[in-house]
Image (spheres, rainbow, N blue to C red):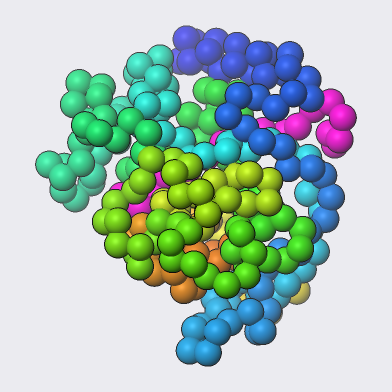
Amino acid sequence: MAALSLLMASAGAARAAQGSEAPDGMVEVPAGPFTMGADGSDGRVGVQIGVDSLPRHQVQVAAFWIDRTEVTHKAYREFVAATGRDTPVDPKFADFYSWTDGEFPPGLANHPVVYVDWYDADAYCRWRGARLPTEAEWEKAARGTDGRTYPWGEGFDETACNVRETAVGWSTPVGTMDGDRSPYGVMDMCGNVSEWTQSWYQAYPGSTLERAAFGEKYKVVRGGSWLLRAEPFARVTHRTLSFKPTKRHRGIGFRCAMDATGDGAP
């Protein structure tokens, strides 16, 4: 634990020393308001908008940095080697996906790491001197300030991102689906793998929805994945699923965020 704390502190100090320069692999999302959530006009005929994504509302977000891509197996291996944390495993079919002697399955170095629960993702981000993005930060990074439906704008294009209809059958190396790019240059927020956020699953401000799942029970997972159909999961407003923090799944990974410092910082 002492070694882990030292590594976390060193990473945090290194980041702080960089001032307003974005850390390697991260992009800045500037401070300011954006439109979060959906309304009844956002759905196509026959597609049910998740009622937990209603209503549209304005959210003020401080400046932050966010990883341009999802955390890869290669990057996660460095964390495992430095901290001794257990390697990801498939909880149901260990033979299908397993790390061996600290190594990820062959051919997946630049694919997003999966089978990490919320605690694993949180620990990795802290080790880097970062944190998981909040749900609001994730959505702003994905859609910008113009209320768009997909990272690239309006109109779904199944060739732009890795979702079920694309029929890749597994994740792709991060950042290779060039169409899946947000206004800030953040990649793979429509598809590839869904992502843990820092936020608990709660009703939005102005919502009258009541659910037993609301509260500090489940963490929000955002974004579509290679496993999920495009509609409605690929929409940047969709609250893909909410899981217990101990959930592990082949379609869930994560990326890190960090408070911005220097010009434009809160």
Q: Which residues are magenta?
A: 244-266
Magenta-drawn stretch contains 220: no
Compared with 9, 217 (above or below) is: below
Residue shown at 67%/14% (left/top)? 13
Name the side, left or right, on which 167 lies relative to 136. Answer: left
Label the magenta part by its dominant secondary structure.
Answer: loop
Compared with 62, 239 (above or below) is: below
Q: Is residue 43 visible?
A: yes
Compared with 2, 232 (above or below) is: below
Counting from the top left corner in percent of width and height, residue 114 is at 35, 42
- Depth check: give the residue in front, 23 or 203: 23
- Depth check: give the residue in front, 227 or 126: 227
User: In the orientation shown, which residue stands out farthest toward the bottom?
Assistant: 45
Counting from the top left corner in percent of width and height, residue 46 is at 48, 89
Counting from the top left corner in percent of width and height, residue 248 is at 34, 47
Quadrant in the rendering for residue 54: bottom right
Name the side, left or right, on which 69 lies relative to 16. Answer: left
Magenta-drawn stretch contains 246: yes
Q: Quadrant of the C terminus?
A: top right
Residue shown at 26%/30% (left/top)? 104
